[in-house]
Image: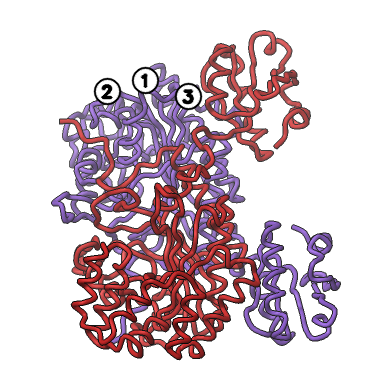
Chain colours: A red, B purple
Amino acid sequence: MALSKKPYKGTRDFFPADKRVQDYLFEVMRRTAKSFGFEPYDGPLLEEVELYKAKSGEELINDQIYDFTDRGKRHVAIRPEMTPTVARMVAQVHRETPKPIRWFSIPNLYRYERPQRGRLREHWQFNVDIFGAPAEKGEREILQLLITLLKNFGATEKEFRVYVNHREIVDDLCSEVFKVQGETAYQLYKVIDQSKKLKPEALSEKIQALKLPAPELFQEYLALENLAELEDFLKKQKLLEKHAAFFQFINDLKELDLDRYISFDPAIVRGLDYYTGLVFEVFDLHPDNRRAICGGGAYANLLQIFNESPLPGVGFGLGDVTLTDFLKTHQLLPNFEKPENDFFLSFQTDKAELSIQKLAQALRDKGYQVITHLESLKLPKAFKLSEQKGAHVVGLLGEDEWKEKKISLKKLASKEQESFSLDEVEKMLNFYHR
Amino acid sequence: MALSKKPYKGTRDFFPADKRVQDYLFEVMRRTAKSFGFEPYDGPLLEEVELYKAKSGEELINDQIYDFTDRGKRHVAIRPEMTPTVARMVAQVHRETPKPIRWFSIPNLYRYERPQRGRLREHWQFNVDIFGAPAEKGEREILQLLITLLKNFGATEKEFRVYVNHREIVDDLCSEVFKVQGETAYQLYKVIDQSKKLKPEALSEKIQALKLPAPELFQEYLALENLAELEDFLKKQKLLEKHAAFFQFINDLKELDLDRYISFDPAIVRGLDYYTGLVFEVFDLHPDNRRAICGGGAYANLLQIFNESPLPGVGFGLGDVTLTDFLKTHQLLPNFEKPENDFFLSFQTDKAELSIQKLAQALRDKGYQVITHLESLKLPKAFKLSEQKGAHVVGLLGEDEWKEKKISLKKLASKEQESFSLDEVEKMLNFYHR
């Protein structure tokens, strides 16, 4: 029986047209991160499972992780996320590295999921983190960078919105207003996290089950629609002053003209994750694709598992699958079906083959992308192939040209044509240059 | 107990200085491949083990592969090499794709090895293949590309050499001159492959064990030192005419001035691999690092396992670990210790913080890399940090500048300094532009 030609379930083959899309996404990510002075890093694909156990939720470890025991009896996993790796790496160097530490990476990650829209078993994720920045300033820069990234992809406030919340505010509301703690607080967090996905009756049921002393206050919290309403709510509960820094942070974003991208959402808490401060999610505003395309937040204790002194951090992860869906939905993805090349050099007489090769080498030495066809080509085929290969110039060398040691170059867009002696590379580059 | 901060055995953490080296290697690889019109592709990290079983040697499957059974009972492996994946992908599209198909990729690969110089468990490999090219022309282009790549890294014929051989020649010698076939031919191949690594006595012993009818002819073959000697040897054995195309191929390389990078080596057969035609390895010529840094060859039957019609291919794989050793040995690796940035903007009075942020955003919008320091900085520290961050220009905004809504910019190299109104972005970019 013949082998299957399909890729492993939930993964993708990147044919050249797909890989050019990915290269474009990665290029914009890198350019944006570098425009803020962020530096690239990467870690190994495999980590010991202990690392994920120490950091992540149990669900991830139990059901979603690709783990196995290696031939040396080490229990390892293919990374399901980058945060444990970056924490491990920062733990190695943070003492001697000037703060803030600004790092980014674009790792591929594996999760054992049922493949569906926006979710695959293998995806790439743009990870950006800043460590050791002054309070609120790292948070601000991360949101700046995230918004700049989406703008660099051509998106505007019409296409996406960043919904924010703050774990310390939610924590305070839990303990001082909703009056819950311990296991009930944990359950309350879960309800907040699920509140948007639940039907009203199911939500009411879950809230009732919590037996809150004042469930109407919790309902009121969940109904808050914007930052002004949150401010009022906190004021009534005498918690506003304690969280003045958060509202100052929002005000700074206004000064930088970024508030039009940002809303408050009481339901954003980022699950049971390790966040301790600001939490945020970017949502696609298109009715056909209303989903989170990115999430992140601030965390204080990521180095604890390595017995290192605390170092505050803020970061986000943006997956290539959800990003691509977002860009496609808004027709923001350029067309990468065809490659782009400078010259497609063909010959119509076999004698010319090595001359074409020599010329190609000379043009490549000048930094140009040159395809040579490796056997004699009739003219219509030469034009068709150069068009398919996205060449700007087609080179033709038939019997007539051969007699004079010449080549004819023709620009595919303007149809302009000229012939050159085979050694007149400079003249050719006056005729066509990038 | 605190968790280990070390990466998994045999893998590397890429801190920014390391990642910049890797990015440089990958950039030169991509640029070189594209200069020949090769197109990028990638495949999944995991493949079903069946694929490797069908294609690879047993040793790889048994001892070196990272395989495990997923939660859906699929037997999968982390890719130990890219060839099976590219074969699987080409098998999907080769019928409707114009030939030749020129593809490249830079995947990370895993092999369970004892870590040592040049060998790690995780490495990246530049994979370049051309499919469906006319006989000898694809081979020539692959060697051209490989040599161009090493030249683009700054290497010359003093630093490396490409050793070539041809499987059809070795096959013919086996059957017609050494008079072996079946299992003995297989053993003979093994001896050829190991001949360089064995001591003379051990080699003699192995040859004796083969019980060749004329062992002195085999010894004579192994002693051949260059293409002229091979030509003589084949002539004596009346096999020269049959392999005229190989010598024509070598002659074409001479015409393209590439013969000075190329030698014949009778010991190169590329193991028991799937090659069927040209085989080659690149060796570092430095006495401290005399090892193969790259290998490749031509293969005819890679699509067979998919029940597809034959499609000839030629390709090579070049690993990042061996390449880095090579470049370091010859001091060809640029220094990437520090990042490179355009502006490092600092303030010496807290009032100026948001003004600095606005200016940074305006400069980033013009395509510049701008670091802002997020808290007030004394001048000596500002200079030190901007130097560490590889900034070309440091921005200073203290009480004096604040009164006039100005910023002082100073070029770190020339010490040239000027002050600008905070909104004079164009003037700043006349003062400094990339």
Residue sitting farthest toward the front: A216
Mark 2 and mark 1 lie on one chain; the one further toward the N terminus is: 2
**Callout 1: helix, strand or loop?**
loop
Q: Residue at x 16, y 56 (%)?
A: B71
Q: Earlier in the sequence, mark 1 or mark 3?
A: 1
Q: Residues within 10 Å of mark 2 (few under 14, many from 20)?
A: some
Q: Which residue is mark 1?
A: B239
The residues bearing labels 2 and 1 have C-alpha atoms spaced at a distance of 9 Å
**Amino acid type, mark 1:** Leu
Q: Position of residue A239 (x, y in %)?
A: 45, 89
Residue type at numbered disc 3? Phe
| Residue type at the position of mark 2 | Glu
Dots 2, 3 in contact, CB < 8 A: no
Residues under labels 2 and 3: Cα distance? 20 Å
For disc 1, the neighbor class at 10 Å (few under 14, some 14 to 19, many from 20) is: some
Letter of the chain that mark 1 sits on in the rendering: B
